[in-house]
Image (cartoon, helix red, strand yellow):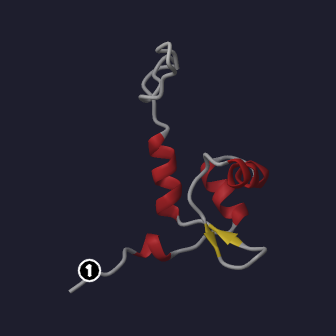
Amino acid sequence: MDEPTPILARILLSEREAADLIGFTPRFLQERRLRGGGPRFVRVSARAVRYRPVDLESWAAERLRISTSDCGGAVDDAGRC
């Protein structure tokens, strides 16, 4: 039997709510949807997107660093961040 989905995975936040939660503007989220690199989102219609709190948390966790020189494993061919 499948385990029930956690409540936070089922809640959908508006763009404004998601932006407020992560401390950015809705425009930042719009740009990230266009260019990539932002949190996962749910397209509920042609003009409406929503965000799951669990995806916002995961996106933020992927960006945790311990110093400004910490690349998080992403380096170029020359070994630079």
Q: Which residue is mark 1?
A: 3
Q: Say left or right for 46 vs 69.
A: right
Q: Is residue 60 left or right of residue 28?
A: left
The quadrant the N terminus occupies is bottom left
- Picture quadrant of residue 42: bottom right
Q: Nearer the viewer, residue 62 or 13?
A: 62
SS at mark 1? loop
Q: Residue at x 75, y 49 (%)?
A: 31
- The amino acid marked with disc number 1 is Glu
Q: Quadrant of residue 4 in the image?
A: bottom left
Q: How many marks?
A: 1
Query: Which x, y percent locates residue 32?
Result: 69, 49
Residue 57 image position (x, y, % from top left): 48, 53
For the residue pair 12 and 32, the one nearer the viewer reads as 32
**Residue in the picture at 48% in, 76% down:** 10
| Residue 74 against residue 9 in the figure, above or below | above
Q: Position of residue 7 (x, y in %)?
A: 42, 76
Direction left: furthest residue? 1
Q: Residue at x 61, y 49 (%)?
A: 38
For the view shown, which residue lies furthest in the bottom direction? 1
Q: Residue at x 66, y 78 (%)?
A: 44
Q: Specify the farthest residue to the front.
A: 77
Q: How crowded is the residue under tag 1: few (<14 C-alpha within 10 Å), some, or many (20+)?
A: few
